[in-house]
Image (tube, grey):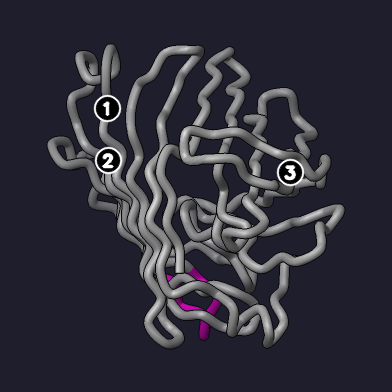
Amino acid sequence: MLLFSSAAFAAIPTEITAEYQLVASGITVGRVKESFTRKGDTYVIRSVTHPEGMLKLLMDDQLEVASSGRIVPSGLQPLTFTQHRLKDGKRDIDATFDWGRNVMLSSYQGQQTEVPVPRFTQDRISVMYQFMNLGRPAEIVEFSMANGRRVETYTYRFVKEERLETPAGAFETLHYQRVVADPKDRKAEVWLAKDRYNFPVRILFDDPKGLRLEQTVIALQSR
């Protein structure tokens, strides 16, 4: 489990704003605008995806994912998670976390369910911010991730330190790769900018069906 020291807790930034370019199998399909805001011991993360090019012709909609919660010694502790589409709300998700009982209360397509969650579980978007202030590279990072409906365990292994060139500039990064046991699992890699609170500046997903989705930062500010 990825845990944070008191010094790391104090060093979590007050604000991060970023924009990513989304490329699927070599074709630009969208942009992602993301923000992280800390006020005292609370946080809010908001990510909005806008389709472009061919994807816009097929699905002209906006996807917004948001997480809010507390900042505790173990990192981020989500209290709410939402996933909404601007024009089509059929697959919208609203979830709240009850850490007194270690359950997630999920609302999806009119159904209300309770899902048990392990301690330190992250949601779909807060999970990437758990890399903040990792410090020295950990060989193995493991955490539980809830997508608002169910919980999965994700394990990442450290690959190497690497200089990465992006449209937002060059970054010294920590390169991690997801460990998968089942060929049907989606592969993933992430490059964390060491001097930007280990913020992900490149994320790569490989779907077992052959779709390769790359998310690369094109603008980044932090303080």
Q: Earlier in the sequence, mark 1 or mark 3?
A: 1
Q: Earlier in the sequence, mark 2 or mark 1?
A: 1
Query: Badge 1 is on which residue?
Result: 51
- Crowding near the residue tagged with mark 3, few <14, some 14–19, many ≥20 C-alpha atoms within 10 Å: many
The quadrant of the rendering that contains the C terminus is bottom left
Residue at 44% over, 64% down:
114
Q: Is disc 2 in contact with disc 1, using a CB cutoff of under 8 Å?
A: no
| Residue 30 showing in the rendered view | yes
Location of the N terminus (image quadrant):
bottom right
Indicate the position of residue 77 as horizontal and vertical percent values. Answer: 52, 74
Q: Secondary structure at mark 2?
A: strand
Q: Which residues are magenta?
A: 97-103
Give the SS element for disc 3: strand
* Residue that label 2 marks: 63
- Which mark is first along the chain, 3 or 2? 2
Please tell me whether mark 1 sits on a helix, a strand or a loop.
strand
Residue 98 painted magenta: yes
Residue 49's place in the image compared with 71, above or below, is: above
> Of the residues shown, which amino acid type is indicated by label 3?
Tyr
Give coordinates of residue 30: x percent, y percent.
Answer: 33, 27
Q: Nearer the viewer, residue 29 or 166?
A: 166
Horizontal side of residue 66 vs 180, given as left or right: left
Residue 207 in the image: x percent, y percent?
58, 22
Give how far apart the Cα atoms at labels 2 and 3 are. Answer: 26 Å
Q: Which residue corresponds to mark 3?
A: 176
Q: Are marks 2 and 3 in contact (CB under 8 Å)?
A: no
Residue lying furthest right in this view?
139
Give the CA separation, mark 1 to mark 3: 27 Å
